[in-house]
Image (cartoon, grey):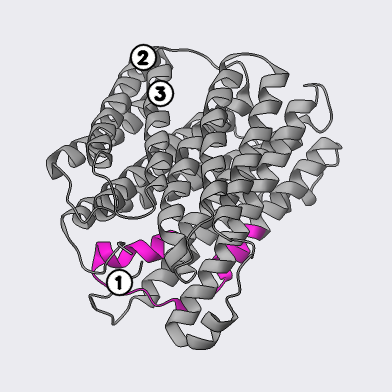
Amino acid sequence: MAGLELGANNNSTVSRPFVVSAVVLAFAGSLVGSVWTMSLFGMQAESGTYYHQVFPLHRALQIDGFLTVLIMGIGYMIVPRFRNSTLPSTKLAYVSLALALASIALSTASMASPEKGGMQQLLSSAARLAGIAVFAGMMFWMLRIRPRLLGLADYFIGLSVAMLVALGVIRLLGIGPASALSEVEVLLLFPLLMIFGVEYKTMPSFLGFIRPRKSAATASLALAIVSVTLGVSSALLDSILLSIAFNVTLLGCATAFAHSLYLFGGFDNSQILKLISGEKKARYLYTMAYSRLSFLFLYAGIAFAMLFSALSSSSDLSYLSYDLAIHLTAIGFIGTTIALYLPLMLPAITGKQVYFARFNHAPVLLLVAALAVRAAGDVVLTYGLLQPPLSYLLMASGWMVVLALAAFVVMVHRSMKGTTNTGTNIM
């Protein structure tokens, strides 16, 4: 099966600044998010509005910055590789990165100077859309080349790119959302769909060259298209029924997709586990564990989103379900999936092998603990139990995410020490 190969080429070289920029933005966004979490659990600044002003910055750095830049970098690397081809223009790829980073800078500046915020936000949206348009143009140009195997993955990737463009147009037009949660869920749909496309293409080789269940994958794609339509509609229209229908459809899409790839069983891998050992076995078990964990987070996130849609805004559980729906999906599903795939892609970008046998589970355990503390904090807020010193402990949830990110980077870096390009396939 065609896949990622160790050793830098045109595509992986282009992806390097995207990955570096994404990691920097992830740290910056997580730090800002930690400050926001402190304000949420009672920490106040001399200016009563200071901490609350950082929330839009957190979102800009994480979604507009980290996720968008990372997905663009991944797209530039994997879509050509799936076709044993190269990008039509590396210079245009760098232009799209420059535009994306300029968009973040302008958005940040607009928050620092509210009197000029309107024009800067407009310029930010225009720069973002221009960068996305360049990215989308090259992706659709490459997608026209039919791959040899598992072509259904292209439809998930194409839908993700189209979703990203549509969101850019909606933002530039200044159309405000009617549902806060549906808006965030829709923003997270483009990385989710890109993940589905990448996993559909690569997970069969990870699990032992098992061909996906095509009927389940086709059903997942159909539900994904319906989810996109319902998601955008529920974000723009204040409709409980649309929001519930969107989340039910999205849950069905995710469930069908996981079933198509045998993520939770349905095949006997005992012989595979007997035949492999050492590094290969460590990578296999890591892939199985993290792919399953990520989808459990996704299911939980969608379930809380469904609960939020069914509740009235005055319900005691309204904020709890809203907050957990976002963080279980963004940090749980997307974060865990990135922790799975980034080490698999780094050899192609850096030319150095990543050894999974040297990994530990400290980063993901910190991530799970952070989400658990966050959930406990939401319960405390819901029932009015927030008092020191408990509030100080709950403030740690954001910093635990920062620590998990740092631990992951250090772990991967240490696993690459003393290694060189071996020229072997990892997919």
Quarter of the image with the N terminus in it: bottom left
The amino acid type of the residue labelled 1 equals: Asn
The amino acid type of the residue labelled 2 equals: Lys
Would residue 137 be found to the left or right of residue 10 on screen?
A: right
Q: Position of residue 264 (x, y in %)?
A: 64, 62
Foreground of the two, 265 or 99:
265
Disc 1 from disc 3: Cα separation: 35 Å
Quarter of the image with the C terminus in it: bottom left
The amino acid type of the residue labelled 3 equals: Ala
Chief secondary structure of the magenta span? helix
Q: Give yes or no for residue 350 being in the magenta stretch.
A: yes
Foreground of the two, 261 or 305:
261
Q: What residue is pinned by disc 3? A: 166
Of callouts 1 and 3, the N-terminal one: 3
Mark 1 vs 2: CB contact within 8 A: no
Would residue 136 be found to the left or right of residue 321 on screen?
A: left
Q: What residue is pinned by disc 2? A: 116
Q: What residue is pinned by disc 1? A: 425
Residue range in magenta is: 341-368
